[in-house]
Amino acid sequence: MGKKIRLTTGQALVKFLKQQYIHVDGEEFRFVDGVFNIFGHGNVLGIGQALEQYGDGLNIYQGKNEQGMAHAAIAFSKQKLRQQIYAVTTSVGPGSANLAAAAGTALANNIPVLFIPGDVFSSRQPDPVLQQVEHEYSADVSTNDALRAVSRYWDRVTRPEQLMSSLIRAFEVMTNPATAGPTTICIGQDVEGEAFDYDASFFQKRVHYLDRKTPVERELRGATDLIKNSKKPVILVGGGAKYSQAGEVLARLSEKHNIPLVETQAGKATVSADFLNNLGGIGVTGTLAANKAAREADLIIGVGTRYTDFATASKTAFDFDNTTFLNINVSRFQAYKLDAFQVVADARASLEQLEKTLGDYQSLFGSRIAELKAVWNQERKRLGSVTFDRDAFVPEVKDHFSQALFNEYADALNTTFAQTTALYTINETIEDDAIVVTSSGSLPGDMQRLWHPSKENTYNVEYGYSCMGYEVSGALGAKIAAPDREVYSMVGDGSFLLLHSEFITALQYKKKINIMLFDNAGFGCINNLQMEHGSGSFFTEFRTADNQILNIDYAKIAEAYGAKAYRANTIEELKAAIEDAKKQDTSTLIEMKVLPKTMTEGYEAWWNVGVAEVSDNEKVQKAYDDKQRVRQEARQY
């Protein structure tokens, strides 16, 4: 018999985490960098005790909100290109329930993270314990079952020896590019402290290999033929291309064969925005250049994309009558989308093979790519220099934003600053290698269009789930992943109010982040959606009971936390604040009061949203009729 080690389940878990390594392109390093925790009665005496005794070598951070610290873990893994993770442990009940939004975020974005919530007593003897829910139909259901729907792999450990098979399965899922996502292992709080004689071999160094799957001959031949027979192919760069580190080969292929690149949110900053053939974001939040190229294409080469409705403009971005699809993806499920020819393989490996088979092929785009890019660059500069006058007509704002309402906001917030101008100014002022983080509201759309990352992997934007609360928490995770670089969180006032708990954690552990807070006194993005489809402004602005616009001093909040705070409502003030923030050792917050309705509009893109079929409002009726008209023209899959 082999050597045995008697440990509690919690202790065995911690010792196992420290011995997991990953091997990528000849390099080998530890896969689990550390653990985020909030201790409660379901995990403090089991996993907490184990971390205290055996946690040396792991970076351990105390979170302030379970969703927040989980989002930090997700952003860390995203910044590390899914090659390293954090584990996240919570107590039972409300603690584990707070993981649900973050788990959904990780699942939608295919980001590996290990969730370890405590669970109710497996023995069931003290039931119902504190924070335990009860169901008449089963005694085998706890709050943690809510995480099943948002986990790539889910398991409940009710005996110490079950931990071994459960952990090995979880790490197989997280280290497999085709299945990467959140894994949840729920451990009964009594089981966490129970001992078992584990085989010593379970705690030996275990290496997980990320081998690049290459296309088979049939796939390579089919892909080559499709491209050579196309006249105007367009490469759609998705998150899988970024995680595969395919930026260099994408640029080479694009330049040699004169094929334009367009990007999803997850794929942005795989290739520099300065690259001559990079036309930027596609779809609902896309650039005019990218959307025009996509409509002209007769072949879409999707590289590591899952074709969300924003990227495809709800399947109206392409000329389906004249366009075919070639999908390169490690996931067979994703490769099948839009009835494409499938290459189920690693993005970089596949593109490197295509370099050898495409020969001297040239698209017929000719100078069209440069023309599209030049026109968009002019539009970008215009959007970055929008100015307003309180007493003048305001042609830039949306039709449903009256002069009177404009003046009301300008007076209440004491600003005439445009959101696009502020964002453009930030892009032009911060460091080239700085990392930007955002997630929800109008900012991701503005950034997809306006943000020009000149360095690869500097765009940590979560838009697969568009989860409010990722912005500040994600900045902490990105900073932990890249401690020598500045990190900027682009966040609206709505998302900041919803969740900024890990700003405290950043200050606590001296992980400097810079919060760029865009305050337009409301949920501006949803207010736009509401009013653009015929409804009035209904509970999406931040107003008092007597209908006054809220003017919150967010800088004071940051100062109270111990951060360095600034107020900037002009280009000059914003530039000065950023330059001073660069000199600080502590976290900063720059509050910008920006006018509503000063974000970017759509550029020949449509989004399919639910509109009331029956209404006594003529504007709503018209919005519904317009939607039906577009739907009739759209191709459905």
Image (tube, helix red, strand yellow):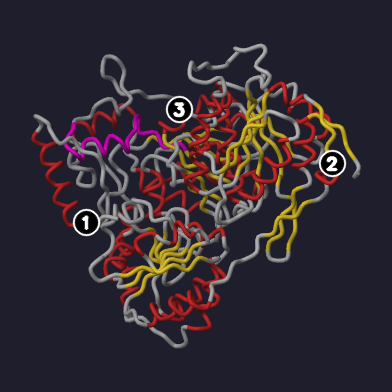
For label 1, the crowd category at 10 Å Cα-Cα, with few meaning under 14, some 14 to 19 and many 20 or more, is some
Three-letter amino acid code of the residue under disc 2:
Asp
Residue 396 is one of the magenta-drawn residues: no
Which is more foreground, mark 3 or mark 2?
2
| Circle 3: element type | helix
Which residue is the site of mark 1?
634
Vertically, is 495 above or below 140?
Answer: below
Q: Which circle's residue, 3 or 1, is located before the other in the chain?
A: 3
Which one is nearer the viewer's eye here, 597 or 502? 502
In the rendered structure, which disc, 1 or 2, sits on the residue that comes first in sequence? 2
Q: Is residue 614 above or below residue 286?
A: above
Q: Nearer the viewer, residue 12 or 276?
A: 12
In the rendered view, would you say 311 is above or below 250? above
Disc 3 to disc 2, C-alpha distance: 49 Å
- Front residue of 114/481: it is 114
Task: Residue 293: give x, y in percent of width and height.
Answer: 31, 68
- Residue at x 12% of width, y 33% of height: 614
Which kind of residue does numbered mark 1 sit on?
Ala
Specify the amino acid type for callout 3. Leu
The span picked out in magenta is 517-535
Left or right, residue 90 beside residue 267: right
Q: Position of residue 409 (x, y in %)?
A: 28, 30
| Residue annotated with mark 3 | 497
Is label 1 in contact with label 2 (beta carbons under 8 Å)? no
What is the C-alpha distance between the residues marked 1 and 2? 59 Å
Which is closer to the viewer, label 1 or label 2? 2
Give the structural element (helix, strand or loop) at label 2: strand
For the N terminus, the image quarter is top right
Q: Position of residue 377 (x, y in %)?
A: 35, 63
Q: Is residue 390 left or right of residue 374?
A: left
Which residue is disc 2 drawn over?
Answer: 199
SS class of the residue under badge 1? loop
